[in-house]
Amino acid sequence: MTYHRTLATLFGLWCGAAAPAQTGDNVLIVVADDLGVDQVAAYGEGGAPPRTTNVDALAARGVLFRNAWAAPSCSPARACLMTGRYGYRTGVGSPGAMLSANEISLPEALDTAGSGYAHAWIGKWHLGGGATQPNVAGWSHFAGLTGGGVRDYYRWTRTVNGQSAITTTYATTQIADDAIAWIQSQSGPWLCVLAFNAPHTPFHVPPAGLHSQTLTGTPTTNSIPHYKAAVEALDAELGRVLASLGSELARTNVIFLGDNGTPRAVTEAPFVRNHSKGTPYEGGVRVPFVVAGPAVSAGGREVSSVVAIADLFATAGELIGHQLVAPVIKSDSVSFAPYLANPSAGPQRAAIYAEGFTNGIDPLTDGFACVRDEAYKLIRRYAASGAATEELYHLPTDPFEGADLFSGGLTAGEQAARDRLAAHIDAVRDTTGRFAPFGGAGCIGSNGPPQISGAGTPTLGQSYDVRLSQGVSTGLVALTVGASKDAFGGIPLPVDLQLLGGGPGCFLYTSLEVTIPTATDPAGQAQISVPLPDEDLLLAGSIFHTWLGVDPGAPNNPLMVVTSPGLTAVPGR
């Protein structure tokens, strides 16, 4: 809850915009651990996938996303789901990282938006901290394992809201039991993340009634069928969870996905072992992503447009009828709900992004970043020397990334694709503080059209100045420190003040969470210094400013309020 204190105290901001009434539809987000598209029969891509009857049934009545990315490994995927933000922003780049308490989590956003939804995280956590960390992060109920996995599926430490004890119930079954128990205790709408530990290692022999594999040898010497048995056990227990919903299933949106691709040891042709979990290749980051429920129109179809695990944050808000916005903070989440409601919906994002880096090391000197659009994919590998290398692939003709286009020299079209994707990576990882103007300059006051400008550089831990020129002479003005330029209190921005008696061309461009009054000098100039806290959470976010002034001499302006254009301050390091 540190986020609340930091921004509320220093900026007075929060997501207070009005939202539609809740839909009442539940949201169940099911995460499989170490499961690529090759292991789900509905995708038709694996050579010999295990039996996934229940996931396939979801696809048959829902929407199957063909080109969905999560992350190369588990902790970064979970952090993206929780925050709607890439690892470069949260600092979670590889397994074992602790998600900062400053980050605004999905349950915190639900509560602050006044959604009225109960929420729980059931199963694998793997975002750091001790037994109480999931609850500290905002989940009102947690039951599962807080670490990265279990050493024994039949004997493991189960934590329930901070209290831990050894259980000997098969892990996949216990996690399903915990989800069923919590869901059945709810009397109103709910959101539940059901994060199975399966089919993550250790490879093992699941209970016989949960799988159809013939298991010979040991899990170590014959790992593939044991892995597939764990997948089938997960699918069977998912089916039990869904069956337990009864009539509630009709009002529950179910989202099933993997957190990363299939592990190398169990990857089979035509997929490539050295392009599996932990790598930036499709086998490492492309995952099953299936949605079924009341939000889906004309089910039983596929969407080829790209989507990302970070998009779950915004989509969850749209599915329950609330906009989950965290003001000032940079979000990477784009709702994929339009694909569910409209079979003809066009692409909602131009590209998707994933990365991997060593926790605590500068990502610009470590690991990799990758980005893809509908056709091309760029991989950039970083090094301590600062000399990054790149790979470029054309996925429609080379889905297993066997032919790096750089090896043969790029055509003009390929070079354009590379430059476009490289610019996307650079934009995600840009930490440069800057100003960006917006809005028009048509509001005329007694001293001409008021103008806004920034001085200095918006830098964490420092201050920057916002200046006014051509304002009213020796008059009262105020600077806004706003969270949005799109809406305020449910009212779309900008607001045309002429509708309220203002002058032509005068608009309110920003929300009004904070207004700082001051006076202009005889030349109509004013300046206010805005301090930025030294909080990484604010990096690359947006703070919106405009000047408002009382100007009795403004022509054709009975309201006597004049405004400057808008100015965005983007905090950097």
Image (cartoon, rainbow, N blue to C red):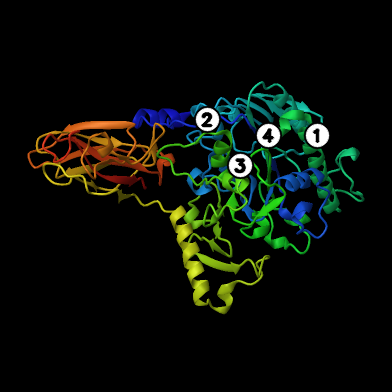
Query: Residue 398, position in %: x, y?
Result: 66, 69
Query: What amino acid is found at the position of numbered circle 4 in the picture?
Result: Thr
Indicate the secondary structure of the residue bearing disc 4.
strand
Can residue 519 be seen in the rendering of this structure?
yes
- Precedes in sequence: disc 3 or disc 4: 3
CA separation in Å, label 3 and label 4: 22 Å
Indicate the secondary structure of the residue bearing disc 3.
helix
372, above or below 196, in the image: below
Using the image as rendered, state which of residue 477 and residue 382 is in the foreground: 477
Q: State the residue position of label 3.
A: 78
Using the image as rendered, state which of residue 70 and residue 125 is in the foreground: 70
CA separation in Å, label 3 and label 1: 24 Å
| Residue mark closest to the camera, 3 vs 2 | 2
Query: What amino acid is found at the position of numbered circle 3 in the picture?
Result: Arg
* Circle on res. 252: 4
Query: Residue 218, position in %: x, y?
Result: 88, 49
CA separation in Å, label 3 and label 2: 16 Å
Residue at 65% over, 43% down: 296
- Precedes in sequence: disc 3 or disc 2: 3
Q: State the residue position of label 2.
A: 108
